[in-house]
Amino acid sequence: MRTIALTSLLMLIASDLGRFSAQATSFDVASIKPNVKEGDGAIQARANGRLTATNASLRSLILRAYAIHDSQLAGAPGWIATERFDVEARVETPPAGGPEALMPMMRTLLAERFKLRAHNETRELPAFVLTFARRDRRLGSQIRTSEADCTRATQLTEAEIRAQARDGWPPCGMVYVVSYVAAAATGLENKTRVRRSGISMNDFATTLQTSADRPVVDRTGLEGRFDVEYSFAAAPATAAAGGTQPTLVVALEEQLGLKLDAQRVAVRVLVIDSVEHLIEN
């Protein structure tokens, strides 16, 4: 099959999902401004203490800050999905916990600028459970115990981060994603290739939620950090396989030795009690 490079996207973003460090509770400098442009937004958190968002809805900011899937947000007014914002925030001393340690600061920022008040509940929702695909619990060839220096990642400059990614693997706690369009027997396919460096299984499960289009709960019991690489057709995990590229479910099983098992699971749900329009800087 000949690949047709119609589009190519390279993103270097931090894995800012999952467990949080309590080293700091607010950014040293933060700015939120309305953005009236149309189109998809982007949110990036980096191990060097910087968080940026471009044309991001308040709903997407909340989902990222609390590391939840869209179905885990309740009581939200409709306008939080339509009003969009640009965010620039940073902390002078990068947290040792990596990019995920920026999320409590993001939650504080949302509480200050949008008067966001919310509480957690547990509800049973359709979800995926991440577990081993093989009975012998043997992992696939494209996942390995990470040897990345996670302490060094907090001191990398933007140029160093991009240079290290060009060498093949991103710095610890970050992800290298290439999305492209290729020819297939059924027409054109959207494909995605992912490399994640130094990520825990709990955080990895959370990162799968967007592609799987459901909450993902880690039940592997694996400890430590891992480097993972996988390629799949850019479609929801519940979609039927019709092209030459595996869906996310198949890719995880064949390449990583992990399985997404569809179940109804008790998961955390964030219920919004109150939220207001942006309080300008």
Image (tube, grey):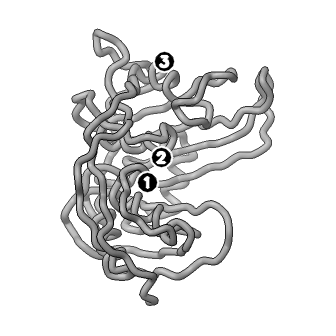
Instruction: Name the residue that disc number 3 marks.
Output: 254
Image label count: 3
Give residue 167's position: percent from left, percent from top.
Answer: 54, 42
Q: Are marks 1 and 3 in contact (CB under 8 Å)?
A: no
Residue 27 visible: no
Q: Quadrant of the C terminus?
A: bottom left
As measured in the structure, the alpha-carbon distance from the residue carrying label 1 to the one carrying label 3 is 25 Å
In the picture, the disc for residue 167 is none
Amino acid under label 1?
A: Ala
In the picture, the disc for residue 14 is 1
Q: Quadrant of the N terminus?
A: top right
Dot 3 falls on a residue whose secondary structure is helix
Instruction: Name the residue that disc number 2 marks.
Output: 175
| Image-based side of 242 in relation to 198, left or right | right
Disc 1 or 3, which lies upstream in sequence? 1
Instruction: Characterize the local packing of mark 2: few (<14), some (14-19) or many (20 or more) Cα atoms within 10 angstroms.
Output: many
Give residue 144's position: percent from left, percent from top.
Answer: 37, 27
Disc 1 or 2, which lies upstream in sequence? 1
Q: Are marks 1 and 2 in contact (CB under 8 Å)?
A: yes
Up-down relation of residue 279 to residue 71 (above or below): below
Judged by depth in the image, the label closer to the viewer, 2 or 3, is: 3
Dot 1 falls on a residue whose secondary structure is strand
**Residue plotted at (42% across, 44% down):** 207
- 225, 102: nearer the viewer: 102
Give residue 193's position: percent from left, percent from top.
Answer: 58, 36
